[in-house]
Amino acid sequence: MAPVKDSFMSGSLDHSVRIWDLRVNACQGILHLRGRPTVAHDQQGLVFAVAMEGGAIKLFDSRSYDKGSFDTFLVGGDTAEVCDIKFSNDGKSVLLTTTNNNIYVLDAYGGEKVSYPT
């Protein structure tokens, strides 16, 4: 679900991301990607992330997604299928989980792994 509009996104086994408006009975936009995508909106609804197998994460501007991603980065060396991706409340980090039980916290706009003091 988008945090500010009546819309949501779905990632599908047919390698597509579809953008839906709750007030309309049809898909409002579609992206064709490689692998089964997992999607998430940031808290402001301005950016969405699409994570795909092979550790690729693409960032899109919600208002101009049809122009393609504005950034792409790879989660170093992890080729597993992505289970889920979520933005942090402040939008600075993303949490990524994979089918081989890895969990990553990444800088949302650089892709670097974030480490926290223990």
Image: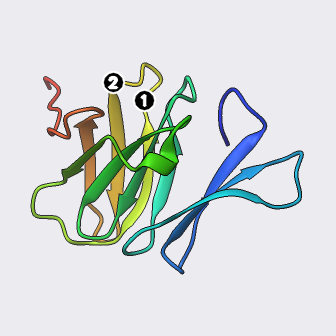
Residue under the point 14% across and 31% down? 115
Q: Which residue is mark 2?
A: 92
Q: Tell me the tag on residue 75.
A: none
Which residue is situated farthest in the left direction here?
77
Tag count: 2
Q: Secondary structure at mark 2?
A: loop
Q: Quadrant of residue 100?
A: bottom left
**Closer-to-camera residue (25/99):** 25
Q: Quadrant of residue 14?
A: bottom right
Residue 24 position in % (x across, y down): 88, 51
Residue 46 position in % (x across, y down): 52, 28
Q: Secondary structure at mark 1?
A: loop
Residue under the point 32% across and 31% down? 93
Task: Kindly identify the amino acid type of the residue bearing the numbered disc 1.
Answer: Ser
Which residue is situated farthest in the bottom direction here?
14
**Closer-to-camera residue (97/9):** 9
Are the residues tagged 1 and 2 within 8 Å (C-beta)? yes
Q: Which residue is mark 1?
A: 88
User: In the rendered image of this protein, does residue 53 appear above or below residue 24?
Assistant: below
Task: Kindly identify the amino acid type of the residue bearing the numbered disc 2.
Answer: Lys
- Locate the C terminus and report the quarter of the image it occupies: top left
3D distance between C-alphas at marks 1 and 2:
6 Å
